[in-house]
């Protein structure tokens, strides 16, 4: 899958991978800081997130394969990589299946074992919103706030809301696929 990415700076290549419901925009400030230290920072939107394509399939192995495809496209043979949460799981999968492509790896806020699903409340709240009837961002915020009480989480999720076409909001993440494959 051809992923959306942003490149900042020049130098030693470093890939940044976001967490669940995140996107490359969330890592730009950190990416700029790394770029100032002589790094070419490649900030990736993982499959079913941000501006990368949506697909009915969603797994850590597929996301790792997508990263290998991106490395080939960018003609990078070995990179440093930093992954947060879901992105960290992708890094762990890459270390298991394509360690030859990784120079250094940093995994943040996740460990190499199965976690019980702890995003169920968020998924249920997102699934309860019918974007075909919501006409403004404020309406979406009010609807989501009924079930998401933490303002930081609420605003993080709302950052993914965009105008797909006039008067039609959509999520930048593929909610249906993530919900279906969350345990994989």
Image: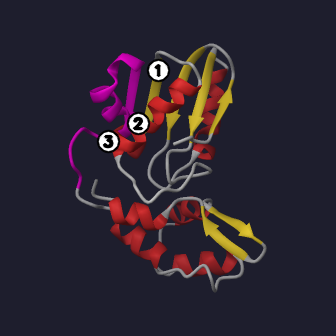
> Is the C-beta separation of discs 1 and 3 under 8 Å?
no
Separation of disc 2 and disc 3 at Cα?
20 Å
Foreground of the two, 73 or 107: 73
Residue displayed at 46% across by 76% down: 127
Q: Is residue 170 left or right of residue 49?
A: right
Could you say which disc has been placed on residue 110 in the image? 3
Query: Pointer 1: what residue?
Result: 80
Using the image, tell me which numbered label, if any, was put on residue 183.
Answer: none
Give the extent of the magenta segment.
90-115
Mark 1 or mark 3, which has the lower sequence index? 1
Q: How many marks?
A: 3
Question: What is the crowding at mark 2: few (fewer than 14 residues within 10 Å), some, or many (at least 20)?
Answer: some
Residue of label 2: 65
Q: Is residue 93 magenta?
A: yes
Residue nearer the viewer, 127 or 68:
68
Task: Where is residue 50? Give x, y as percent.
Answer: 59, 52
In x, y percent, where is residue 163? 72, 67
Q: Residue farthest to the right? A: 166
């Amino acid at each position: 899958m051809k992923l959306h990415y942003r490149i900042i700076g020049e130098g030693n290549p470093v890939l940044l991978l976001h967490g669940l419901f995140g996107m490359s925009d969330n890592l730009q400030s950190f990416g700029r800081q790394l770029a100032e230290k002589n790094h070419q920072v490649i900030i990736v939107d993982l499959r079913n997130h941000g501006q990368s394509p949506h697909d009915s399939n969603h797994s850590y192995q597929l996301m790792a394969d997508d990263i290998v495809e991106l490395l080939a496209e960018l003609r990078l043979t070995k990179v440093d990589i930093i992954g947060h949460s879901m992105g960290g799981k992708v890094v762990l999968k890459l270390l298991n299946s394509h360690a030859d492509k990784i120079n250094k790896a940093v995994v943040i806020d996740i460990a190499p074992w199965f976690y019980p699903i702890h995003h169920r409340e968020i998924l249920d709240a997102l699934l309860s919103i019918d974007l075909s009837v919501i006409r403004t961002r404020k309406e979406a915020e009010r609807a989501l706030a009924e079930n998401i009480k933490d303002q930081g989480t609420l605003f993080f999720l709302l950052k993914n809301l965009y105008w797909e076409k006039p008067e039609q909001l959509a999520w930048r993440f593929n909610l249906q696929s993530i919900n279906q494959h969350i345990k994989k």
